Image: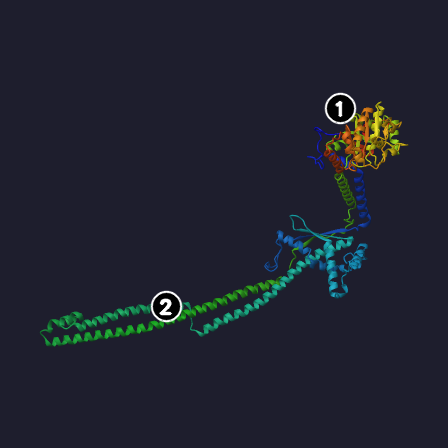
Amino acid sequence: MKDNGSTGRVSPVAGHVPDSVDLGAAFGIVWRGKWTVLFTTLLGMLAAGYYAFYVAVPLYRATAVVILETQQESVVDLQSVVGGFSGDTSAINSEVEVLRARTLMEKVVERLDLTADPEFNKDLREPTLLETTRARIRELLGNTANASALSPEVLSQRRADTVVNRLLDQVSVRNVPSSLVFQITVETQDAEKSKLIADTIVNAYILNQLEVKFEATEQATGWLTDRVAELQVELEQAEASVADFSAGTNLVSVESLQGLERQLKDLRERISSAESTSADATERLAAFEAATDRETQAEVADDGQLRRFLARAQNDDAVATAFDTRFEQIKARAALDATRSAQQLTALRQSLPQLESQLEAQGQDLITLQQLQREAEASRLLYEYFLARLKETSAQEGIQQADSRILSNAVTPLEPASPRKSLLTLVGGLLGLVVGLMIVLTRESGKKNFRTAAELETYSGEAVLGQIPIIPGRSRKSTLSYLAEKPTSAAAEAIRNLRTSVLLSNVDNPPQVLLSTSSVPSEGKTTNSLALAQNLAGMGKSVLLIEGDIRRRTFNAYFENVPNQGLVSVLTGSAALSDMVFQDKLTGADLLAGEKTNTNAADLFSSDAFKAFIASARAAYDYVVIDTPPVLVVPDARIMAQHADAVLFTVKWDSTTRPQLDEALRLFRDANLKVAGLILSQISARGMRRYGHGGKYGAYGGYGAKYYTN
């Protein structure tokens, strides 16, 4: 049947993803897989319960509590040597690591002799099946450790390290938020052991703090002792240097140096005065020598006696002689004064460099002395300081306080902390529930077949003309008997619905030649063809049912005494149609069986003889139903479909895959053939109820019990 117009068909939407999540559909998927989910949940609970009650080793948890002291009363101030706890975040984190330090755990192991405890030393335990299996596998792989080559010391150290590692795995340290309180929790297989280990850890922790402070004090004392001895030697050397310098120089002091400075100043003032006096004396002597007459001499001499002599010297020779004698005496005295002044000036000038040199030398000596004195004083102060610190440190030995104290000792647990059997069983059930949901959702997401007509129509874009349930019967022959004997059954009503949909598929030109096919064998197309022919014949119509699958000849499975000759003989003209048909009382239709032939079936159905045969069948019968081979197996169905009015394509419920449907419909589209509609066949009512569709669709709906008699 050619498709010459618009088919109105929507292309298949393989892999269609909805725009929104359908919560109802998701719940339906989970509900359909409820037994799987229930099974995995129960299995998880049983497995977890078995492990919790019979396999898991009970562990007892004990907790000791310590608090850090940030402020302590100290007998002496020695915070620079062994300061207390600061209490900031970094210090708290550091204390957590100290509580979990290997050195601390090694002391606990040694004190409690945990290397002799099988719980911590696996060498003392019987190897488990898993450990034995691993050892054998390593032996087979040649990956065995050569323990005999190791020395006893190395083996002992490894064993001790293993015990410490095991102890660290079973110890947890927690700082209570916004506090300086630490909880040390230990889990072991024995309640008393857990308590003992927890208390031992906190005691070793506090003792370790005291030991650290004591060691720090000892180190400080030793260092200070050595330093004080060194400083004492330095002080003695500095004081000796001051004494030696003082002994090798004149008495030097700031006061004597100031006296020398005053002497130097006085000397310079005297030199200045002597220079002035000497200049005056020389000038006066020069004036005496320059005076040639008695008047000038009397004026230069400025002598009263000469003035008296001057008035009479001109008239009296004796007075003139006395004048000259007196002037010479005054002049000689002026010459003596000039000489004395010059000598005094020379003497003063000669003493100036000596005094300056003496002042400079004593200044340098004073500077050197002061430097030596400062060094000696600095050495003395440093020596006295370190000596005081040494005495404080010595006094501090033996009176240190730990930065922590025990706030609460561990209490022997009365019940095991783990496993928490009820919680573990619940967790196992939750895991089983999750696994079950994953299995159901994974299985549903991987589904590639069809379970409802709506799902089939949405995917293919083709109308679903009928939904045929599984027809009860032990064999194919009994299916027609069932439909004939139970005309009001759900299956019979489904066939009637199919007939009605087919006849109404084209109201203006009702189909007369109906072709039934499917993707692959065993999808129910032959049963649908027989049931449809039976139903049409029950309307009083003349119906011809043709076995188009001449390769397999499936009519033999439904009818007895099927003739060996049939369709091929009619097409070759060796027999008439009326002679080749046979009747069956259950169908009420004429049956034309297939026939073995050496001619290729596709060539046979492509012949003009087949076209003429269909035309003659149209004239002789009200309806012609052709049962054809599967589309994906041979091309026969597509060839015969060119002469049919309606192609009925059967899809097996929950079996035909989407790729099979896509490929079959594509072959029809490529041949420009229209599929009138699809038939969802062999629907399981129980399966539909299991998938949550039993109350919604067709003859297998939950409400059908009121209308059908099965």
Position in image of residue 377 (x %, y %) = 50, 66
The quarter of the image holding the C terminus is top right
The quarter of the image holding the N terminus is top right
User: Which residue occupies 62% across, 56% down?
Assistant: 84
Q: Let me know if residue 692 appears in the view.
A: no
Query: 604 and 48: which one is in front?
Result: 604
Position in image of residue 165 (x %, y %) = 72, 57
Q: Amino acid at mark 2?
A: Glu
Picture quarter containing residue 362?
bottom left
Q: Which secondary structure, mark 1?
A: loop
Q: Residues within 10 Å of mark 1 (few under 14, many from 20)?
A: few
- Residue 261, disc: 2
Of badges 1 and 2, nearer the viewer stands: 1
Position in image of residue 473 (x %, y %) = 88, 32
Mark 1 = which residue?
A: 509
- Sequence-wise, the earlier of marks 1 and 2 is 2
Q: Which secondary structure, mark 2?
A: helix
- Furthest toward the right, the residue is 561
Up/down of 104 relative to 537, above or below: below
Query: 113 and 192: which one is in front?
Result: 113
Up/down of 482 relative to 356, above or below: above
Q: Residues within 10 Å of mark 2 (few under 14, many from 20)?
A: some
Picture quarter containing residue 333?
bottom left
Query: 517 and 341: which one is in front?
Result: 517
